[in-house]
Amino acid sequence: MTGLPATNKGVATRSAILERACEMASMIGLEGLSIGSLAAAVGMSKSGVFVHFGSREELQLAVIDLTAQRFVEHILSPALAAKRGLPRLHALVRAWFAWIRNHRGSCLLLSAIVEYDDRPGALHDRIVSYQLRWRDELMRAITLAIECGDLPPEADKHQLAFEVNAIALGVQHDAAVSGIDEAIDRGERMLERMLPRRAVTQSAIRGT
């Protein structure tokens, strides 16, 4: 029985290393990740890891990219199945809460923007680009809620996207203080106060 071709083995090895790197980054932060610590964690030499990632920055960028890809797969894609309007917006945020829960109370993309907010360079730019894309997705969901009549036409979608993002930040912060269950419960209540199930009442629609 023959083994996998060398190219396939290389891809599989790189994927396994990257998986471990993502796990480590979710616990110690992106800045705490190093070639040396990763090599020790996967039982390889530093040079072995360098074959797949030519530098620490390249490794960190790969971690960001994979995390962002999975963020979309676990949050955005399933939420698109929800009805347009507030149901979809609620689905987005609740899936985000679940993502934070599943990652030990920490979303790497939220943590990384804090780590690199004052550090110009490729990492900062990549992280900001993903944050802006996500903010655009929130605004798109809010715009649909306005168009569906679930939110008033004068609603400020930029402000609402900022506030929704702030709720997730609050949940992540409070998870380290009060525990993830209480943090998500408070986030849920805050979301309901800001975006009730039906923000525009029928009387408001009729102008009464």
Image (spheres, helix red, strand yellow):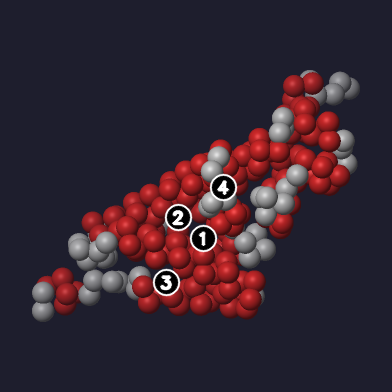
Q: Is residue 110 visible?
A: yes
Q: Counting other residues with Cα less than 10 Å from the Cα at mark 3, is it few (<14), some (14-19), or many (20 or more)?
A: some
Q: Residue at x 38, y 77 (%)?
A: 193
Badge 4 or badge 1: first in the primary sequence: 1
Badge 2 or badge 1: first in the primary sequence: 2
Disc 1, SS:
helix
| Residue at mark 4 | 119
Name the amino acid, label 4: Arg
**Pointers 4 and 3 in contact (CB under 8 A)?**
no
Disc 3, SS:
helix
| Residue at mark 1 | 95
Dividing the picture into quadrants, the one containing residue 12 is top right
Badge 2 or badge 4: first in the primary sequence: 2
Q: Residue at x 56, y 57 (%)?
A: 114
Name the amino acid, label 3: Leu
Dividing the picture into quadrants, the one containing residue 142 is bottom left
What is the spatial separation of the Cα atoms under label 3 and label 2, in whole angstroms?
16 Å
Quarter of the C terminus within the rendering: bottom left
**Pointers 2 and 1 in contact (CB under 8 A)?**
yes
Q: Nearer the viewer, residue 53 or 88?
A: 53
Quarter of the N terminus within the rendering: top right
| Residue at mark 3 | 191
Q: Residue at x 86, y 44 (%)?
A: 40
Task: Please state the horizontal and vertical placement of residue 146, each as a whole percent of the image.
Answer: 25, 60
Badge 1 or badge 3: first in the primary sequence: 1
Disc 4, SS:
loop
Q: Is residue 12 visible?
A: no
| Residue at mark 2 | 79
What is the spatial separation of the Cα atoms under label 2 and label 4, in whole angstroms?
33 Å
What is the spatial separation of the Cα atoms under label 1 and label 3, in whole angstroms?
13 Å
Badge 4 or badge 3: first in the primary sequence: 4
What is the spatial separation of the Cα atoms under label 4 and label 3, in whole angstroms?
32 Å
